[in-house]
């Protein structure tokens, strides 16, 4: 892509109006609407923020045929972060009544007949990046980072981010970013074509100036979805897709092949169909047990005490106290596989929980992933046991207990059958008076 038009900052407050409040505000100055995210620290795109964005767009759309219609829009942030994306606690929940989905918000932004400039004062991650990519232009400060790490949770993007990413930077770079899930710097994003300028000075003033300049020049908005200038060489695009398909063929993480399919769809399908294809892939992945397991580990890693799991850069690692718990968790399970390995770990973990040696079963899951070789895709032993069925596992253990005492069913584990396999809930209910720690 060529350099963006030169940015010329103008002053003046003609036609100023302010609307909204809460996590999203709208202020119109000189017929440039500034829609600003303001929910520190990360401008998470929860229900209130999505409703605020929808209300802001309602107001802008309603005014388009009036004398005071805004000539451009800036989508920015009052904080040092643009947005960290969707609230992961809500991502797979049915939208509450009156709450729009992020993909609907992105489509509305892209369809606006006035130029929309996203101003990134900091990082745009996940759904935040998808929101920025829906704008017609993007400016960012040098310290900003942009990325779509959905693959970490076993998901393709859910709001068209993969399609817009590919349209702006091509199949090779899009696949690299989506499959690695690592954010890139503003300068790298500029070189890749994801943003239109890196701004050292006031990012909001620069974005307003660019929106005003584009409007004054009569430049029509350029929706990102459907841009095809990087798809002229269809064979090169398909070659990139096929190479990644071979690399992901048979990979344990099923969403990797879904991501590759979505980038292929960007070339082969009309834009609207490709967006629906990606949305369907996202919804399918939400229903995949791998997503539930990966999200469980994601939250477990962030809730566990640093006295058990060190998280200072690089891969988390168990501390000395964590390793002591792991030694107890793995005792008796050496050499076992499959359901027997699972049962032994869960039995020992139930004893540790009941003895008060660990706060939550999820802490043991995080430790098992990082210290005992449990796959993230399993969610750890306790998550895997609930997915398998705790009642079924307990019944198996009763059959095995005569041959191996590690399978003796602890009272807490037996009580968890009545709480859908949730040992923490069983412990809170006080169903166990005395526990043998093992």
Image: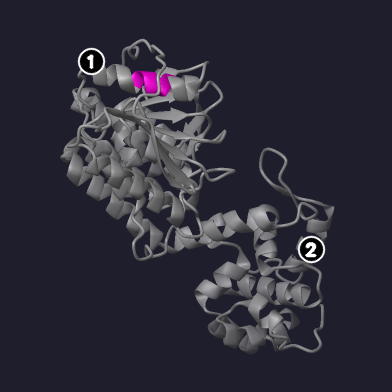
Q: CA distance from mark 2 to mark 1?
A: 66 Å
**Residue bearing mark 2:** 325
The answer to whether residue 66 is above or below residue 323 is above
> Is residue 122 in view?
yes
Residue 367 position within the rendered picture, expressed as x and y whole percent measured from the top left: 70, 58
| Residue range of the region highlighted in magenta in the rendering | 206-210
Q: Which mark is residue 372?
A: none
Q: Is residue 221 above or below residue 399?
A: above
Please tell me which residue is depicted at 52% across the width and 33% down the height of the picture. 123
Residue 241 image-quadrant placement = top left
Q: Position of residue 86 (x, y in %)?
A: 46, 50
Give coordinates of residue 173: x percent, y percent.
38, 28
Left or right relative to 341: residue 359:
right
Is residue 430 in the magenta section? no
Label 1 sits on a secondary structure element that is: loop
Label 2 SS? helix
Q: Quadrant of the C terminus?
A: bottom right
Q: What colouring method underlies this structural image?
A: one colour
The image's mark for residue 217 is: 1
**In the figure, is residue 216 to the left or right of 152?**
left
């Amino acid at each position: 892509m060529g350099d963006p038009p030169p940015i010329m900052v103008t002053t003046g407050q003609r036609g100023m109006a302010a609307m909204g409040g809460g996590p999203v505000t709208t202020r119109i100055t000189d017929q440039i609407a500034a829609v600003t995210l303001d929910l520190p620290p990360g401008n998470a795109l929860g229900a209130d923020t999505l409703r605020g964005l929808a209300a802001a767009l309602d107001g802008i759309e309603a005014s388009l045929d009036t004398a005071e219609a805004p000539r451009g829009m800036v989508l920015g942030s009052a904080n040092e972060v643009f947005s960290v994306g969707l609230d992961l606690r809500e991502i797979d929940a049915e939208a509450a009544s009156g709450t729009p989905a992020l993909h609907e918000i992105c489509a509305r932004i892209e369809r606006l007949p006035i130029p929309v400039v996203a101003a990134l004062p900091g990082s745009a991650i996940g759904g935040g990046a998808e929101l920025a990519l829906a704008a017609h232009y993007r400016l960012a400060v040098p310290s900003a980072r942009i990325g779509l790490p959905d693959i970490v949770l076993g998901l393709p993007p859910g709001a068209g981010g993969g399609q817009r990413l590919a349209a702006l930077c091509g199949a090779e770079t899009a696949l690299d970013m989506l499959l690695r899930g690592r954010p890139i710097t503003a300068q790298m994003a500029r070189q890749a074509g994801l943003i239109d300028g890196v701004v050292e000075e006031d990012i909001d003033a620069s974005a307003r100036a660019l929106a005003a300049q584009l409007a004054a020049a009569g430049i029509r908005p350029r929706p990102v979805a459907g841009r095809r200038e990087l798809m002229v060489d269809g064979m090169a695009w398909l070659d990139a897709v096929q190479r990644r398909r071979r690399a992901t063929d048979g990979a344990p993480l099923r969403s990797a092949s879904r991501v590759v399919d979505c980038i292929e769809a960007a070339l082969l399908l009309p834009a609207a169909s490709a967006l629906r294809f990606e949305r369907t892939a996202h919804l399918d992945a939400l229903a995949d047990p791998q997503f539930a397991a990966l999200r469980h580990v994601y939250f477990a890693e962030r809730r566990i005490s640093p006295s058990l799991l060190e998280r200072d850069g690089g891969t988390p690692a168990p501390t000395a106290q964590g390793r002591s718990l792991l030694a107890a968790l793995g005792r008796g399970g050496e050499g076992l596989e499959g359901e027997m390995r699972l049962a032994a770990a869960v039995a020992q973990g139930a004893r540790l929980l009941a003895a008060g040696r660990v706060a939550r079963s999820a802490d043991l899951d995080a430790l098992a992933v990082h210290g005992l070789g449990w796959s993230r895709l399993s969610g750890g032993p306790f998550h895997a046991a609930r997915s398998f069925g705790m009642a079924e596992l307990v019944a198996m253990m009763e059959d095995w207990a005569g041959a191996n005492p590690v399978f003796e069913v602890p009272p807490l584990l037996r009580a968890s059958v009545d709480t859908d396999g949730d040992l923490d809930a069983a412990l809170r209910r006080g169903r166990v008076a005395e526990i043998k720690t093992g």
